[in-house]
Image: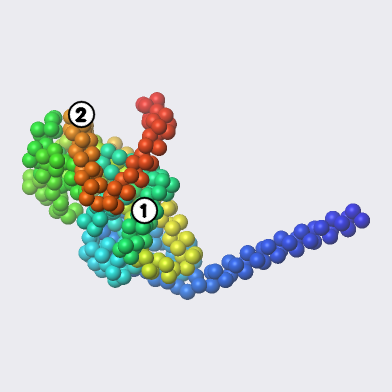
Amino acid sequence: MKRRDFITSSVVGAGALALSGCYKEENRATKSSSVQKKVTLKLATSWPAHFPIMGTGVDNFAKRCFELSGGTLEIKVYPKNILVPALQVFDATSASQIDAFHSGVYYWKGKNSAFSIFGGMPLGLTSEEMLTWLKFGGGMELWRELYAKFNLYPLVGGSTGPQMGGWFKKHINSLADLKGLKMRIPGLGGEVLKRLGVNPILLPAGEIYTALERGTIDATEWVGPALDRMMGFDKAANYYYTGWHEPGSILEITFNKERWEKLSDEHRAIITAASEEMTGTMVQEFRYKNAKALAEMPSNVEIKNFPKEVIDAAKVALKDVLNDESKKNQDFKRVIESYNKFTKLNKKWDDISTRNFLNLRS
Ligand code: CA
């Protein structure tokens, strides 16, 4: 009897399992039938073809979407100026001319100054902290809400890790040394330096080296040792200042919102997972390649810190910039409040964990 009971209950148990398995399989079959249809999306970037780290990152993202979808989701990546000019990818995606883009959020502050906060903050959060604010601190919800007005749906598409302060042809020993300095520096960092007397200049990537080498500009920032050396800046200037204005810039993979909503659940899940993978990999790749490029830096290059009075003045100027913008733009005010709330929450924990560890091990 005991054996029989056992068999019966086993059969019932197995039946229940089989049933629940069946139910799940049916569900999966119903949902995934739409996935079988092959989808091809056009994605334009703001980078040259296969540009190291950023460009190769998006190439790999497209490859992963193809692999993970069993070949049903093909994302064709177009480097800058092939389908649309580098800095028109936002408008072209918004107007449904292309399906998606990969770029830097800081480029769109002319659309809405609040967008610059999603791209990162001078003297602010690092890449890991930015990603935490976006995912858990309400940042992403605000970003999606504000981009929806442009018919866009953003995802994080990588992050640079800490950037350097830039290449200078002469020492910066005081605030006075900044007066009238011509520097290529975009975004909020440029806005802050402008208030310290710098003349911030916007130049396309291809023109920066020549401008610095010929002295048309006195200084430039770009990213970090790996990409800066690739641009040849170590041959045009000797003083390489540590960073303050881009502690963790965020890149974006943004979709046309109507197109995004028409994708199957599976394709949206695959794109989301691939973008997360891309972000993690990019942060690690920047860290490794920057460390390596720094170790191999030529001896003419001197690493310098900005004097305290410059950083102190930058802090004051930044506060003014943020206050002015909050008064002008309600969206900016909402986003900066969310950002500040997370920054405050994060600080105590960061002080006794990461900051403490770094101090201990040094
Ligand atoms: Ca930069």
**Cβ of disc 2 within 8 Å of ligand 1?**
no
Q: Which mark is residue 6?
A: none
Q: In the image, what residue type sits under mark 2?
A: Lys
Residue located 28% across and 51% down the image: 330
Among the 4 quarters of the image, the one containing residue 155: bottom left
> Dot 1 lies on which element?
helix
Q: Nearer the viewer, residue 353 or 280?
A: 353
Q: Quick one: quadrant of the C terminus? A: top left
Q: In the image, what residue type sits under mark 1?
A: Leu
> Dot 2 lies on which element?
helix
Residue located 21% across and 31% down the image: 312
Identify whether 72 is placed above or below 7. below
| Residue receiving disc 1 | 142
Q: Which mark is residue 308?
A: 2
Q: Nearer the viewer, residue 272 or 289?
A: 272
Q: Is residue 231 visible?
A: no
Q: Spatial distance from mark 2 to mark 1, Cα to Cα?
A: 35 Å
Identify whether 301 is placed above or below 80. above
Identify whether 243 is placed above or below 103. above
